[in-house]
């Protein structure tokens, strides 16, 4: 078709009234979608709705659809469930696009009828209030400082919060404050905030690219400091399985990506291939270890990574290991190969079971819960089984609310309240007033405290790989002291209960211990100082420990490919461990115990470059996959049930921006200010921090260790 024919067809189409189907006045009526005039409507489909059978005036094909697909057909918009019209010329498309844009803008300008703000709703005021309002408006101070205008803006912002269901915690966000401050200090005539599509496309792409640039300085430290790849699995609100990957070093965890594994078999080969891609992206020469949980497929994937990259270690998460040990002790299974453990530890399961019965009995009825809250300022919280040390957290909570529970069951309200299940009520009362039951509960909390404290210490993003080996030994000794103190036994006497606990802890440590733990222990100058060695007669320096020395040599051979480098690093380690050569200076020796290990190596390790570089990498690594698990809280916050239509790639971009901006924010000085501190945590769940007791925020504890350290103080 030539241009003259196209112009003639456009003219004919523009003058068409859709004869034989609908009146001309209906087509040209104000407010009718404009692109109906470019098709001939034949027959209405159904009594209600906007579906028509029509003939396209360009291609002369009969179709049945609503206006949205007519629009997609004529404007050649793909992916809308209808074929694009191939007969529409460029000029016709531009004309129709112009008409469509004018129609959409007109709809936006008309909009819904606005509901007046509080400052505009004066009809309900009485005469005195109206007089005060007029007097207030005429005040020179009011006009000078724009108080009325400020009030109106406050009310507009508040209405946005209320109608959008936004958490009040957003008001603590410094970016929220900065955006309005910027608008107030710049004259931007006619400015309109970005719309729906711009926010989810253009601006999102720009911000992600900007965050990637901001992360470059942090990533540039990986070559010197080394990096740990951490990964974990989760399912989003649409039940799609995801595996996330994070890179962490001394600067904090950086979110890399999350892989949608829908329809994939997550065996060791699949996980290993994903790990290889991330390792190559980060730079295999920068990676020191990969941390996952203790699942069999993750262990198999770690072994495949070690076979391909000999200098990279797979390290099981220490926190998962400790949590499994606690489950073996506190929730022993009654099976044939576990009879000894069950015989010694089943009483712990009974105590926890009683506590759960009490908790459920109180919390499952509003009257009983109301009576309890009269006697206890702390809440009786439910602790999810998926949380680390969930049994201990629950029992610690009971220990703190003991007085409130006892006061409740002996009160007149409890006595006068009659429930159908009086047998369960009597059971609850008997347990709560039973001193022997409380003694057993306190005993569980006391002897598991060293394990729980180690979980708390390792479940952070802070470097602690160099502390794990010593912490395991100290933790086991402290558990022994608590058990023997309760049983009243001398240290040389055999304790059946401690023997079971010891075997569980040692077996778990044997499964999670790697040569990298021994190497990190060997490079911590604190363990060579007289102050540490003389603190306990059983302590020996790492170079005198046979197991540690054997595992350290394995690391030297794996981490240094050249034989000459292995010989050099062995010589440098000999000087370091014997405090000879460059390490015999008195200042150097005196600071071994008190100075931060990495700072000590920076000050005194320059003459042993291979060992110093290795120390910088090893002493800056974490020992758990907690950062990767905490990242799922960010995912759940962004890809929530309310936003379950987010596609995986857009959700990943949002999480990338949120997580890494949060990391950059927490490394800034402004983050420590009182008003904005922890602005990125918890939403309205932590709107008020008044009257906070230990474990008051049990859902947050071990998910946000920094906030937990601020809030939770033991009695």
Image: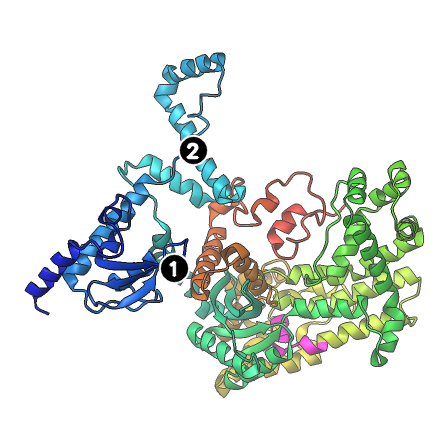
> Considering only vertical position in the picture, is 593 above or below 363?
below
In the image, residue 515 lies in the stretch drawn in magenta: yes
Residue positioned most to the left: 4
- Local crowd size for mark 1, using a 10 Å CA cut-off: few (<14), some (14–19), many (≥20): some
Look at the image and give the residue range highlighted in magenta. Answer: 510-521
Return the x and y of residue 165 as percentages of the image width and height: 51, 44
Residue 23 is at least partly visible in this image: yes
Residue at 19% x, 60% y is: 93
Q: Nearer the viewer, residue 537 or 106?
A: 106
Residue 87: percent from the left, percent from the top?
Answer: 19, 68
Q: Is residue 489 magenta?
A: no
| 315 over 178 or under it: above or below | below
Residue 607 in view of the camera: no
Give the residue pinned by disc 2.
115
Residue 592 placement, left or right of 428? left
- Relative vertical location of residue 382 with respect to residue 296 in this rendering, above or below: above
Given residues 674 and 89, the one toward you in this image is: 89
Image quarter of residue 376 = top right
- Determine contact: label 1, label 2, CB under 8 Å: no
Q: Secondary structure at mark 2?
A: loop
Q: Position of residue 60 (x, y in %)?
A: 22, 67
Q: Which mark is residue 208?
A: 1
Q: Secondary structure at mark 1?
A: helix
Q: Pick the quarter of the image with the C terminus.
A: top right
Q: Residues within 10 Å of mark 2 (few under 14, many from 20)?
A: few
Residue drawn 55% across and 47% down? 678
Q: Position of residue 603 (x, y in %)?
A: 51, 62
For the residues carrying marks 1 and 2, which lies nearer the camera in this image? 2
């Amino acid at each position: 078709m030539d241009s003259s024919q196209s112009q003639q067809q456009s003219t004919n189409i523009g003058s068409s009234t859709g004869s034989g189907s609908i009146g001309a006045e209906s087509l040209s009526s104000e407010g009718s979608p404009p692109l109906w005039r470019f098709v001939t409507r034949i027959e209405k489909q159904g009594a209600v709705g906007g579906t028509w059978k029509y003939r396209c005036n360009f291609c002369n094909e009969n179709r049945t659809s609503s206006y949205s697909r007519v629009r997609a057909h004529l404007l050649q918009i793909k992916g809308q469930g209808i074929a694009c019209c191939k007969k529409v010329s460029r000029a016709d498309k531009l004309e129709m696009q112009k008409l469509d844009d004018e129609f959409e803008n007109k709809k936006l300008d008309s909009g819904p009828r606005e509901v007046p703000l509080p400052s505009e709703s004066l009809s309900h005021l009485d005469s005195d209030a109206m007089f005060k309002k007029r007097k207030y408006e005429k005040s020179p101070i009011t006009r000078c400082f724009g108080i009325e205008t400020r009030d109106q803006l406050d009310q507009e912002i508040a209405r946005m919060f209320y109608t959008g269901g936004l958490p009040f915690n957003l008001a603590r966000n410094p970016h929220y404050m900065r955006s309005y401050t910027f608008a107030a200090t710049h004259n931007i005539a006619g400015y309109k905030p970005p719309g729906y599509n711009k926010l989810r496309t253009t601006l999102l792409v720009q911000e992600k690219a900007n965050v990637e640039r901001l992360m470059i300085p942090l990533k540039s430290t990986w070559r010197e400091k080394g990096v740990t790849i951490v990964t974990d699995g989760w399912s989003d609100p649409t039940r799609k399985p995801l595996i996330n990957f994070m890179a962490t070093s001394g600067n904090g965890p950086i979110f890399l990506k999350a892989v949608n594994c829908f329809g994939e078999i997550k065996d060791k080969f699949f996980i290993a291939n994903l790990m290889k891609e991330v390792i190559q992206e980060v730079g295999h020469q920068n990676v020191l270890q990969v941390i996952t949980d203790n699942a069999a497929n993750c262990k198999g994937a770690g072994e495949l990574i070690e076979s391909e990259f000999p200098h990279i270690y797979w390290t099981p998460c220490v926190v998962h290991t400790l949590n499994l040990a606690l489950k073996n002790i506190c929730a022993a299974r009654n099976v044939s190969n576990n009879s000894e453990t069950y015989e010694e530890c089943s009483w712990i399961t009974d105590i926890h079971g009683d506590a759960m019965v009490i908790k459920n009995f109180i919390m499952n009825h509003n009257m009983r819960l109301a009576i309890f809250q009269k006697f206890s300022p702390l809440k009786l919280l439910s602790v999810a089984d998926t949380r680390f040390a969930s049994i201990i957290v629950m029992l610690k909570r009971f220990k703190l609310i003991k007085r409130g529970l006892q006061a409740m069951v002996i009160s007149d309200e409890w006595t006068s309240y009659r429930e159908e299940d009086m047998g369960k009520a009597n059971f609850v009362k008997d347990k709560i007033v039973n001193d022997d039951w409380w003694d057993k509960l306190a005993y569980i909390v006391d002897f598991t405290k060293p394990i729980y404290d180690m979980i708390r210490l390792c479940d952070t993003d802070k470097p602690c790989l160099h502390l794990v080996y010593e912490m395991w030994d100290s933790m086991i000794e402290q558990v022994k002291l608590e058990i023997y103190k309760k049983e009243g036994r001398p240290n040389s006497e055999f304790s059946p209960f401690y023997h079971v606990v010891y075997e569980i802890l040692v077996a778990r440590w044997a499964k999670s211990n790697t040569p990298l733990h021994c190497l990190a222990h060997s490079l911590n100058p604190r363990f060579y100082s007289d102050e540490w060695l003389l603190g306990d007669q059983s302590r020996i320096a790492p170079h005198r420990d046979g197991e540690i020395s054997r595992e350290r040599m394995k690391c030297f051979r794996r981490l240094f490919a050249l034989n000459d480098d292995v010989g050099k690093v062995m010589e440098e380690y000999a000087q370091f461990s014997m405090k000879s050569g460059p390490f015999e200076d008195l200042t150097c020796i005196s600071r071994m115990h008190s100075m931060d290990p990495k700072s000590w190596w920076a000050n005194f390790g320059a003459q042993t470059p291979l060992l110093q570089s290795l120390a910088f990498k090893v002493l800056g690594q974490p020992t758990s996959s907690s950062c990767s698990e905490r990242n799922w809280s960010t995912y759940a916050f962004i890809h929530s049930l309310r936003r379950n239509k987010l596609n995986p790639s857009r959700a990943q971009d949002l999480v990338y921006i949120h997580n890494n901006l949060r990391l950059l924010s927490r490394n800034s000085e402004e983050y420590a200010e009182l008003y904005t501190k922890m602005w990125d945590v918890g939403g309205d769940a932590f709107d008020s921090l008044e009257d906070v007791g230990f474990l008051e925020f049990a859902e947050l504890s071990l998910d946000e260790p920094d906030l937990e350290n601020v809030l939770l103080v033991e009695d």
